[in-house]
Image (cartoon, coloured by chain):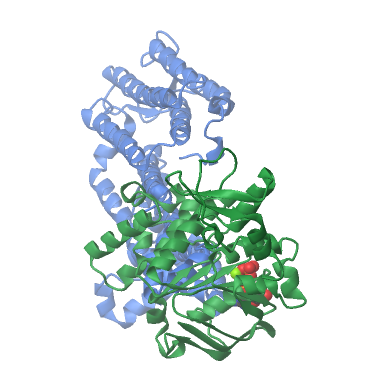
């Protein structure tokens, strides 16, 4: 759990972070979004004391961060730096083992953990472990950056644009991988991004920042349904909010029981989002689609009326 | 003697570049005497042109082969072939000189002398350049380059030890001065290494300090700049006074070798000359460490020391090593001047030779300096390269 109270930082008279307060309960993902220069990275850096705040307080699991020696504090908090920042003179495996070595883990334990993480992120340990970071693609490097931050099993993870500068397909896959790992381990995460889609996909709650202030913190759905006037409304974007709301819901939540022959045209899986269902319905025409599970059996149907209702303002 | 070639140029048609040197080289090798023969001390030397049939010591066939090899290095051949041709040509050049000396001396009195002429040096220089050029473009692995260097030095040692070159005046000069040569060699190493160690002990921490503190930089850099621009003779002279005074005040120091003349002021002067390149490159090396890597290290909980030794120092190392290379090569040359104040080293042979107008003695002092500088350059470049290629280590 992370509690931030009245956090403030000025650089040469310019207020980068202005009286920020928020809480991230254990196991939750909070996305910090906002335009470039609004103070997202500065906020993260104050949480692990890379920058000392001018005012305010940070409590991590109830302990005042200012009372913990900075090195010890940082060893306990995973940090994915903006721009990956792998050490070019170390192998991938050595990079991942950075914090475990600082903590004095023995060689065997560090190595086992490194292998586990590489496998977790879908990279063959024998192939990728000994490589220099420069021999990896951008997406692979970003995965190593995240793996390195998670190496010592921190309860808290700070991520500064961990999936930036990737193609949409790779980014979506990494986000999915990360979401699974995060849920399984119950890690508390603060994720900095200026990609709204990423925030909607990964975050339990989203904090919209502008000029060092948080303007609104809410769940994705509430943020979409009730964005505050001004910057938040502009930043969240109203044009495709119905579709965005639909993307927050799964077909399985709204399917009706049905059975019958395997369909000829469009269909959806139980894990697909209502947004995907809507898209196929529009393509197909008609007012329902069969829901088909992994064994090619029809397990239900999803109706247009339900989708329209979920995405509508009344829901 | 390595030629600086931008990496992107490695596949450029280097034979065209070499051709620029080819015309003067061909003229020099043909028109300048290859050897110079002096039957006695009174007459001046008689030039031996390799291509003139009938002259004792001339070797038209060998000359033709030499010109042929040199010309082949100009063709757009694979670089490895150019390298082999150039090295073979260099070996042939040396062999022809030894052979010519033997022929000339066979009928001459003992006090006659055969010395190396302009044609010899032009041919050797051209082939050495061609070899260095080909080697640079091959982009050989660091260890292979060191192996090549060892091969060339080994071959030279074999040739010198075989006796085939013994009738050349420079080797006769060596025979007469073997003890002085060995002492000069030891003295030269002592000057170079003796100044490098204190320069590193002072320069590396000072460079790191100057990187971290603008105040330290503002004081240290102008002082080091001033030292660097002081002419070496003036520097030796200036050092004689304080060191002489020190030795006079504390006789104990004199027993340690501190004196106004000799090796002590020379080592101090070389150390001072070394500081600027080491400090400047240490600063540049640390400044080149990307800020986000520093932040990554700190963000994961590295302390200052760990960050310095595990992240900053290894990343700064190639640039720092470049500074050390500059210093070593520079000091190998500068150490020759130390002889002027009795500091020893190969300079003693050079200055004695100049005093006696004995060119061979000058060469005996100069050639080892050139060889040491080449060896140091190749070794350091290989080390720097392997750091740069390194990746994980
Ligand atoms: N060390 C520093 N010294 C002076 N000003 C700084 C420093 N770090 C940040 N700032 C300023 O503080 C403000 C917030 O910077 P910050 O890096 O937190 O932005 P950000 O939201 O992370 O932006 P981006 O999305 O571009 O990464 C900016 O105006 C920046 O110029
Ligand atoms: Mg930022």
The answer to whether B129 appears left or right of A303 in the picture is left
Q: Position of residue B165 (x, y in %)?
A: 28, 27
Q: Is residue B5 above or below residue B264?
A: above
Q: Is residue A29 above or below residue A240?
A: below
Q: Locate the N terminus of chain B by quadrant.
A: top left
User: Which sits in the foreground, B194 or B236?
Assistant: B194
Image point (43%, 50%), residue name: B388
Q: Position of residue B329 (x, y in %)?
A: 42, 51
Q: Residue lying furthest top in this view?
A: B54
The answer to whether A18 appears left or right of B337 in the picture is right
Q: Is residue A110 above or below residue B174?
A: below
Q: Residue lying furthest right in this view?
A: A230
Q: Locate the C terminus of chain B by quadrant.
A: bottom left
Image point (34%, 37%), residue name: B144
Q: Position of residue A241 (x, y in %)?
A: 70, 64
Q: Is residue B224 above or below residue A217?
A: above
Quadrant position of residue B193: bottom left
**Where ligand 2 lies, by image quadrant?**
bottom right
User: Which sits in the foreground, A216 or A48?
Assistant: A216
Which hue is chain A drawn in? green
Chain colored blue: B
Query: Does residue B261 appear in this view?
Result: no
Quadrant position of residue A237: bottom right
User: Which sits in the foreground, B191 or A44?
Assistant: A44
Number of numbered tags placed on the structure image: 0
Query: Does residue B88 appear in this view?
Result: yes
Image point (43%, 30%), residue name: B131
Q: Position of residue B305 (x, y in %)?
A: 37, 74
């Amino acid at each position: 759990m992370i509690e931030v109270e009245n956090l403030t930082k000025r650089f040469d008279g310019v207020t980068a972070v202005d009286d920020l307060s928020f809480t991230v309960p254990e196991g939750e993902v909070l996305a910090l979004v906002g335009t470039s220069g609004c103070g997202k990275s500065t906020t993260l850096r104050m949480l692990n004391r890379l920058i000392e705040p001018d005012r305010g307080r940070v409590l991590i699991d109830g302990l005042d961060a200012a009372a913990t020696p900075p090195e010890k504090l940082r060893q306990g908090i995973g940090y994915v730096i903006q721009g990956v920042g792998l050490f070019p003179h170390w192998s991938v495996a050595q990079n991942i083992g950075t914090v475990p070595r600082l903590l004095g883990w023995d060689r065997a334990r560090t190595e086992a953990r490194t292998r586990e993480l590489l496998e977790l992120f879908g990279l063959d340990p024998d192939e990728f472990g000994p490589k220099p970071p420069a021999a990896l693609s951008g997406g692979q490097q970003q995965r190593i950056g995240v793996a390195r931050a998670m190496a010592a099993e921190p309860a808290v993870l700070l991520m500064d644009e961990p999936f930036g500068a990737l193609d949409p397909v790779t980014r979506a896959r990494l986000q999915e991988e990360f979401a699974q790992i995060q849920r399984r381990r119950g890690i508390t995460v603060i994720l900095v991004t200026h990609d709204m889609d990423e925030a909607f996909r990964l975050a339990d709650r989203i904090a919209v920042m502008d000029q060092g202030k948080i303007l609104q913190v809410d769940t994705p759905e509430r943020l979409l349904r009730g964005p505050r006037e001004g910057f938040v409304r502009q930043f969240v974007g109203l044009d495709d909010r119905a579709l965005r709301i639909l993307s927050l819901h799964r077909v399985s939540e709204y399917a009706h029981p049905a059975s019958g022959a395997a369909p000829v045209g469009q269909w959806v899986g139980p894990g697909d989002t209502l947004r995907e269902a809507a898209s196929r319905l529009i393509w197909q025409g008609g007012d329902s689609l069969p829901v088909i599970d992994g064994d090619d059996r029809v397990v239900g149907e999803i109706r247009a009326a339900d989708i329209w209702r979920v995405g509508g303002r009344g829901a | 003697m390595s030629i600086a070639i931008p990496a992107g140029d490695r596949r450029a048609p280097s034979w065209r570049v070499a051709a620029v040197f080819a015309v003067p080289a061909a003229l020099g090798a043909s028109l300048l005497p290859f050897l110079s023969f002096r039957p006695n001390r009174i007459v001046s030397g008689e030039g031996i042109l390799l291509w003139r049939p009938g002259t004792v010591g001339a070797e038209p066939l060998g000359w033709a082969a030499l010109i042929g090899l040199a010309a082949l290095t100009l063709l757009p051949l694979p670089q490895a072939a150019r390298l082999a041709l150039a090295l073979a040509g260099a070996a042939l050049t040396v062999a022809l000189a030894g052979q010519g000396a033997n022929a000339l001396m066979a009928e001459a009195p003992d006090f006659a002398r055969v010395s190396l002429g302009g044609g010899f040096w032009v041919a050797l220089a051209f082939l050495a350049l061609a070899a260095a050029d080909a080697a640079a473009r091959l982009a050989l692995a660091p260890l292979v380059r060191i192996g090549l260097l060892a091969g060339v030095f080994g071959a030279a040692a074999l040739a010198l030890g075989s006796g085939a070159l013994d009738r050349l005046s420079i080797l006769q000069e060596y025979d007469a001065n073997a003890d002085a040569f060995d002492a000069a060699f030891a003295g030269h190493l002592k000057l170079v290494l003796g100044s490098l160690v204190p320069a590193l002990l002072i320069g590396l921490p000072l460079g790191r300090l100057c990187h971290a503190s603008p105040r330290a930089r503002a004081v240290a850099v102008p002082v080091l700049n001033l030292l660097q621009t002081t002419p070496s003779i003036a520097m030796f002279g200036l050092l004689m006074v304080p060191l002489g005074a020190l030795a006079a005040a504390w006789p104990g120091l004199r027993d340690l070798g501190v004196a106004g003349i000799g090796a002590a002021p020379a080592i101090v002067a070389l150390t001072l000359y070394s500081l600027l390149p080491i400090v400047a490159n240490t600063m540049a090396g640390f400044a080149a460490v990307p800020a986000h890597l520093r932040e990554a290290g700190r963000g994961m909980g590295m302390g200052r020391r760990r960050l310095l030794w595990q992240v900053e120092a290894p990343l700064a190392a190639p640039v720092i090593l470049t500074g050390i290379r500059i210093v070593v090569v520079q000091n190998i040359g500068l150490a020759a001047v130390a002889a002027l104040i009795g500091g020893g080293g190969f300079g003693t042979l050079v200055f004695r030779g100049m005093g006696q107008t004995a060119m061979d003695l000058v060469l005996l002092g100069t050639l080892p300096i050139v060889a040491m500088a080449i060896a140091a350059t190749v070794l350091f470049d290989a080390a720097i390269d392997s750091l740069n290629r390194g990746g994980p280590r």
